[in-house]
Each structure stands twice: as C-alpha cells, then as structure tokens.
Amino acid sequence: MVATGEQRTYSSVSVSPLSFWATTAEEREESFRLLREHDPVSWQHPLEGSLMPPQQQGIWAVVRHEDIVYVSKNPEIFSSAQGVQQEEVPGDILAAAESFLGMDAPEHSRLRRLVSAAFTPKQVAKIEDQIKNQAEQIVDDLLATGDCDFVEQVSKRLPMWTIYEMMGLDPAKREAAAAAADGMVSWADEDVAAGREPGQVLNESLVTLLSTGMEFAEHRRKNPANDLMTNLVQAEIDGEKLTDEEIGAFFVLLSVAGNDTTRNTITLTMKALCDFPEQRDLLLEDFEGRIDTAIEEFVRWVTPVMTFRRTVTQDTELRGRQISAGEWVVMFYSSGNRDESVFTDPHRFDVTRRPNPHVAFGGGGPHFCLGNMLAKTQLRAIFDQLLHRAPKLEVGEPSYLVGNFVRGVKSMPCRLG
C-alpha cells in the first residue's frame, strides 16, 4: 500500500463511484471540465467495482489531452505491465486476459511484431472483402426485419462476424465466444451477471475465451487453412513463434477489443447521425470524399474505451503533482477528447472536423491500437450501407452498460421510417 496517499487530499470532484459512471457521458463531462480547468492531475479514491480489496489508497486521474499523450508516449515511466484497468484483478487473470496490452518492452515489442506478421497483405485484402459483404448482408437483414433493436440486428453482428470470420472460427462457436467477450467487460452489470457474482462472470468468460482460442490454435497447427489463426500459429520472426498460451491470450484480447469497441462506435455514431441530421446530410452529399474524415470524428465523439491505467515505475512529476513509484495513473480518454484547448467546439459533432488529434485509439506510443485500420474499415462499410440503403432510419434512446472502462450500449430501438 502506498503510504504517501495518506497525506493527500482527494479531489472534491469525484470520478470514482459507480454512480458517477451510471450517469450519461454528457453529465460526466461537467465533472471532467471542472477537473481539466482546476485539477488536471487529481487524486481520487480507488474506482469502485474491484474484485479484490483495493491495494492502492487512490489513483491519479489524468484528464487533459496533452497529459494523456505524455503518459502514453513514456512507457518507461508509466508501465502497462501491471494491468491497464482500474479494478484490482488477480495477476493470473491479468496475464491471461490482456495479452500485449498488459506488457512493456521487450515482451510487448516481440509479441506485437509476431501478431503483426500474421496480418499479411493477402489476409488484409481478404478481410476487407469480407467486411463489405458482411455489411451488405446485415443491412439486407435489417431491411427485411424492420423495426428492431439496432444493437442486436446491426452493430453487434458486424464486429463479431468480422473477427471470427477472419480468425476462421467455427460458426457454431461464435455466439458463445461473443457472449464471453461481453462478460469480460460487463461483469459488474446486473443484467449481464443474471444473479451470478461478478467474479464468477469474469472467470467463466475468461475460461471460455482462453480454452476456445487455445483449442483452435492446436487444431490449426494440425489442420492449416486460409485464415488468421493459421497465420498466427505459423508466424515466425528470428526463429520465434507464438505459444498456444500467447495465442489464447491474444484471442481473448481480439474478441473483447474487436467486438465491444466497434459495436459501441457503430451504435452511438448512428445515434449522433440521427441527433445531428445536418451532419448526416453533409456526409451523404459527398460520402466518398468525407467518410475518412468523418470516421475520425465518429471515434472521437463516441470514445468507446473511456479509460486506461498505467503504473508508475519511478517517482515522477506531472503538472506539478508529485507521483510516487507504484502508484496508478489513469488516462481518461473521454475527457481528453473533449479538451477545449485542443478541439474547437468539442461538444459539436462535426463530420468535417480537421485537424482531429483524438485519443480514441490511444495517445500514441507503443500501445497505439493495433486494430485501428480494421475498425475504420468496418465503420466505412456499415455506414456506406446504412446511409445509402436505409436513409430514413431513426433510433431511440440507448440503454447503457454501467462501467468505467467501455462505453457500452446494451440496446437501442430503431425504426426504418
């Protein structure tokens, strides 16, 4: 336990309670605005929702864009190797659940290089074709179904289909894997838990994904095919290959990061396009010319991953605050993406916004999102289909997941108009 915390005063603007995260993003933003202005590196109580009694007396909340970038680009001071989420989680779960997200160099560099080697140009081209076909089929089904839950019918389907199709996973196993991926980030939500203890939800979800990934890796070593899992088991750099345990952990990461982030970006972008119809019209006027710029605004606006933490490796200073080795620094991307000193009129959804140095894919550095191009490809494909083929589609109010990590939407009604 870090003794220096006893001498500190907790911020009067608290971002720690689950009740704070049960409010809307707009309501939370008022607290972040106050912190950006008056207490940009603030001492906060441990965030609620841990599976273990907190070993830290508090966390340092970093809310300004500039400081998020600084923390991201200095991994030798702000380490990922002790976990990236705010909850106290047992070390064995961290190792199995976070893959190279929870590593520093050189382990991080080695694993990321090997995984990147599996994304060959041929594989990437195949994935792009798959995504276009998947998006078209999903909107075919939407038009045939009519009024429905947008999350179930559209935004949930594309990421799951894309990730598991490119991996080559047996279709019969995909629903269970996607449900487990949900459990990995929503175990504290009562609807998801369905009477189970949060720790049970997390453990069952992790075991399901790990065993699925490792069994699939073993199968592909013996039965190679034209898919990403085969590329992963065969990837080799300087005589090194990925172990089944490393592939299993990466399968967990890919399932969680690939499913939840893109799903929620699709959902809440559709909501924004309905709330700001002039922006929808503007994008449709020149879709091909504006979609790439618009996608950057989609991810800034939504910020599907709201927070990431780092552990300080040495005594350091940030914005005049003395931070001790071993303490936790948490980057609040939601706040950084509304920073008035960086973004003109940050609370305006603007599909033509330039420049747009958002931190929705991270603040740079070695942990910048490896899957950012895959996410952009999916967003381009699905909104091409939705905006052109369902131009009168409208959505209702989302039902949000309560949590401090992923900005998750459980359901959102839609009608075709």
Image: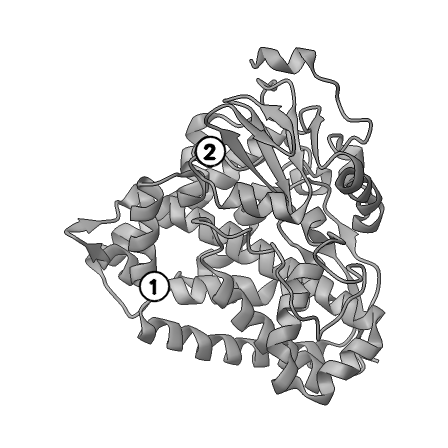
Residue at the (61%, 55%) spot, across then down: 360
- Residue 114 placed where, x, y %? 29, 54
Amino acid of disc 2: Ile
Quadrant of the rendered image containing residue 13: top right
Residue at the (48%, 53%) spot, across then down: 368
Tell me the CA gap for discs 2 and 1: 34 Å
Residue that mark 1 sits on? 228
Q: Dot 1, crowdedness within 10 Å: few (<14), some or many (≥20)? A: many
Which dot marks residue 407?
none
Q: Nearer the viewer, residue 212 or 338?
A: 338
Q: Dot 2, crowdedness within 10 Å: few (<14), some or many (≥20)? A: some
- Residue 154 placed where, x, y %? 65, 69
Q: Are marks 2 and 1 in contact (CB under 8 Å)?
A: no
Q: Quadrant of the C terminus?
A: bottom right
Q: Give the SS element for disc 1.
A: helix
Q: Residue furthest left?
A: 239
Q: Is residue 48 visible?
A: no
